[in-house]
Amino acid sequence: MAHCPNREELKARVWVVYNILLEYNCRTEYESTITSLAKQYQEQVNIITKDMKDQISELNSEVDKLKHKLSEIESKNRKLEMERNSFIVKNQDLVTDLENTMLLHEKEVVMRLKFEAKISNMQAV
């Protein structure tokens, strides 16, 4: 470079070329970094999305199981309600029978007392 007549101009052009190469290199590295980060984050998003879909699927399965159990419980509840109503009707019938039996017993006791009173009157005469 010492024997070049336009040394300063040559230095300036070398620096311009260096600047262009450096800028190109930086831009390429930036694009490469952005691309790799985008791929990395996309992979993470895909993993999270898959996990969420799996969890949603599991939750839907649990919901179906719970709905089935609820249906069974409601069926058992209806059956028990019918049995309870049947017991209530039987209980009411038994209470009615007991009341009728008590009335008949009271009538029988009254009649017996009247009969005994007439017998006593007849023996007294």
Image: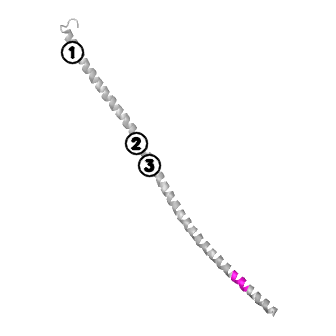
* Residue 108 position by quadrant: bottom right
Single out the residue that lies furthest toward the right.
124
Distance Cα–Cα, label 3 vs label 1: 65 Å
Q: Label 1 neighbourhood size at 10 Å, few (<14), some (14-19), many (20+)?
A: few
Q: Mark 2 falls on what kind of element?
A: helix
Q: CA distance from mark 3 to mark 2?
A: 12 Å
Write down the residue under mark 3: 57
Secondary structure of residue under mark 3: helix
Is residue 108 magenta-colored?
A: yes
- Asked whether 99 or 76 is in front, the reply is 99
The residue that label 2 is drawn on is 49
**Looking at the picture, does residue 14 appear above or below residue 108?**
above
Q: Which mark is residue 13?
A: 1
Q: Which residues lie in the magenta part?
A: 105-112
Q: Residue furthest top?
A: 3
Q: Residues within 10 Å of mark 2 (few under 14, many from 20)?
A: few
Out of 112 and 74, give the one closest to the viewer: 112
In the current view of this chain or complex, which residue is farthest to the left?
Answer: 5
The structure residue drawn at horizontal position 43% and vertical position 43%, both measured from the top left corner, is 51
Instruction: Name the amino acid, label 3.
Output: Ser
The location of residue 95, given as percent across then percent down, is 63, 74
Q: Quadrant of the N terminus?
A: top left
Q: At label 2, which amino acid type do we have?
A: Thr
